[in-house]
Image: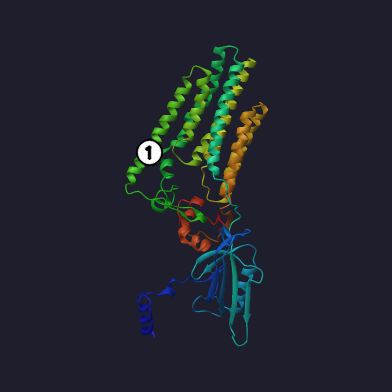
């Protein structure tokens, strides 16, 4: 027989060493293994057929890929030497419970691999007889299941909309602040002193905050990925784990030292640019330069190198770093309040713009970022509303709406976190294999738990559900 098989393989165009059976995956559903006799599936495109009078042909409109359906015919056998399983009756009960469980589950298909599917009503038909004895035959119908994500038909991405609304917010805020200041000036010297006092207090906070954004270690850590450069790296160059969405693979570079030097130089240049912009702001002599200088400093921080989280934290701190110095005259109080409003609104807008670039790895992280930015946006909205700044208020609402749409779109494709508890500390590789049947996700668990050594994971930690 092997000779005949080799001859047939040769005639069909293959080699004698071809072994298609070695490519088959061990089949299971929700962790319940079984043997497969045959499988079939239905595939195609969903189409709307438009027929018109006096036309012999119809216009076929494509409306997306059709739902994939799979039918697997298999059996459960007692104490199988191939897939294990144990007692046949216990296997049957486990498979029934897996098919009746709420929600979608993971199906390991023998040829298609891992699939997320749902079992419809009467999707499992299982039978046994005294003739078959310790064997149960079954037919399993599964329907491919996806996430609750609606199609995006707008040609402009949500992230670009946030950026556009931020630029509109800067223009409206700068114009409104200048108009307010010039309308409140009673004495030029006193007005300049009031503005300078508010600005000096804020720029002192800038000097102590930008180190987080331009820190060389943070910049390098957010550039290189953990696939090639260590489990604690969070960048994308060289590849990085991105949880349930798979691996983010950015082409590696041949000369890592050159890239490190380039990133380091960019970080130093960004820090120098921010400090120069701050110095120019402190040396301003008229309201126009002061107001525009604040916007320039905020934009310099926003455009600097470094991780998104560092920029969000820095801008959040600066949004709350407003002067509380007592002012005697009503004019000085109004000017100081205008400068504080300018700072809060611009930093809040920049914080929102930076957060729109975030790439959260879980739904919980996306919700935390959204909540954090929303609280700051609400503070700025209340401040602008109390001052009857209609243009500023409308711009804040626009950027808030586009940001929420952006984060909602990203969160819809992410898994949520769950808390797991082990009896004893386990290595990250073992834990990844136990939770996801994928040892390559060990680095993801190490980053999530923030442990010093991957061989000793905590007994209680939060991990992605899938």
Q: Nearer the viewer, residue 313 or 334?
A: 334
Image location (x, y in percent) of residue 112: 50, 67
Q: Report whether 101 appears left or right of 167.
A: right
Query: How many numbered badges does the structure rendering display?
Result: 1
Residue 104 falls in which quadrant of the image?
bottom right
> Is 254 located above or below residue 164 in the figure?
below
The residue sitting at 49% across, 24% down in the picture is 293
Q: Nearer the viewer, residue 370 or 60?
A: 60
Image location (x, y in percent) of residue 288: 52, 20
Image location (x, y in percent) of residue 306: 45, 39
Q: Secondary structure at mark 1?
A: helix
Mark 1 surroundings: few (<14), some (14-19) or many (≥20) residues within 10 A: some
The residue sitting at 54% across, 36% down in the picture is 164
> Is 316 located above or below residue 202 in the figure?
below
Residue 17 falls in which quadrant of the image?
bottom left
Q: Which residue is mark 1?
A: 264
Q: Quadrant of the N terminus?
A: bottom left
| Residue 236 seen in render | yes
| Residue 326 seen in render | no
> Is 110 located above or below residue 377 in the figure?
below
The residue sitting at 48% across, 28% down in the picture is 296
Q: Report whether 348 appears left or right of 18.
A: right
The residue positioned farthest toward the bottom in the image shown? 131
Residue 96 falls in which quadrant of the image?
bottom right
Q: Nearer the viewer, residue 130 or 387?
A: 387
Image location (x, y in percent) of residue 377: 61, 36
> Is 164 located above or below residue 193 in the figure?
below
């Amino acid at each position: 027989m092997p000779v005949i098989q080799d001859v047939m393989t040769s005639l069909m165009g293959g080699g004698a060493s071809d072994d298609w059976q070695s490519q088959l995956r061990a089949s299971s559903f929700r962790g319940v293994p079984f043997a497969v006799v045959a499988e079939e599936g239905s595939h195609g495109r969903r189409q709307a057929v438009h027929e018109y009078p006096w036309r012999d042909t119809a216009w076929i409109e494509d409306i997306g890929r059709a739902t994939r359906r799979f039918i697997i015919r298999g059996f459960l056998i007692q104490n199988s030497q191939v897939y294990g399983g144990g007692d046949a009756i216990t296997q049957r009960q486990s498979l029934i419970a897996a098919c009746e469980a709420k929600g979608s589950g993971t199906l390991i298909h023998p040829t298609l691999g891992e699939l997320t599917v749902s079992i419809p009503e009467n999707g499992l038909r299982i039978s046994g007889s005294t003739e078959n004895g310790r064997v149960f035959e079954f037919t399993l119908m599964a329907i491919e299941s996806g996430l609750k994500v609606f199609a995006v038909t707008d040609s402009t991405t949500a992230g670009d909309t946030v950026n556009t609304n931020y630029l509109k917010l800067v223009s409206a805020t700068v114009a409104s602040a200048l108009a307010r200041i010039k309308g409140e000036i009673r004495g030029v010297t006193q007005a300049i002193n009031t503005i300078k006092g508010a600005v000096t207090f804020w720029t002192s906070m800038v000097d102590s905050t930008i180190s987080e954004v331009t820190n060389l270690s943070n910049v390098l850590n957010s550039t290189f990925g953990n696939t090639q450069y260590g489990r604690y790296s969070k960048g994308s160059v060289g590849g990085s784990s991105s949880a349930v969405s798979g691996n983010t693979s950015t082409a590696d570079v041949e000369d890592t030292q050159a890239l490190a030097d380039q990133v380091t130089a960019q970080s130093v240049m960004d820090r120098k640019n921010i400090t120069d912009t701050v110095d120019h702001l402190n040396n301003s002599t008229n309201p126009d330069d002061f107001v525009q200088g604040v916007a320039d400093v905020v934009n310099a921080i926003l455009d600097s190198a470094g991780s998104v989280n560092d920029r969000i934290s820095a801008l959040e701190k600066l949004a709350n770093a407003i002067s509380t110095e007592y002012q005697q005259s009503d004019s000085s109080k109004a000017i100081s309040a205008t400068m504080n409003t300018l700072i809060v609104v611009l930093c809040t807008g920049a914080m929102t713009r930076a957060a729109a670039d975030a790439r959260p790895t879980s739904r919980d992280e996306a919700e935390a970022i959204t909540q954090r930015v929303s609280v700051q946006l609400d503070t700025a909205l209340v401040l602008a509303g109390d001052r009857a700044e209609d243009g500023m208020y409308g711009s804040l609402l626009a950027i808030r709406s586009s940001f929420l749409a952006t984060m909602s779109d990203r969160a819809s494709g992410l898994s949520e976190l769950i808390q797991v508890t082990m009896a004893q500390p386990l290595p990250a590789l073992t834990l990844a294999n136990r939770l996801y049947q994928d040892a390559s996700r060990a680095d993801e668990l190490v980053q999530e738990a923030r442990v010093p050594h991957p061989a000793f994971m905590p007994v209680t930690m939060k991990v992605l559900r899938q």
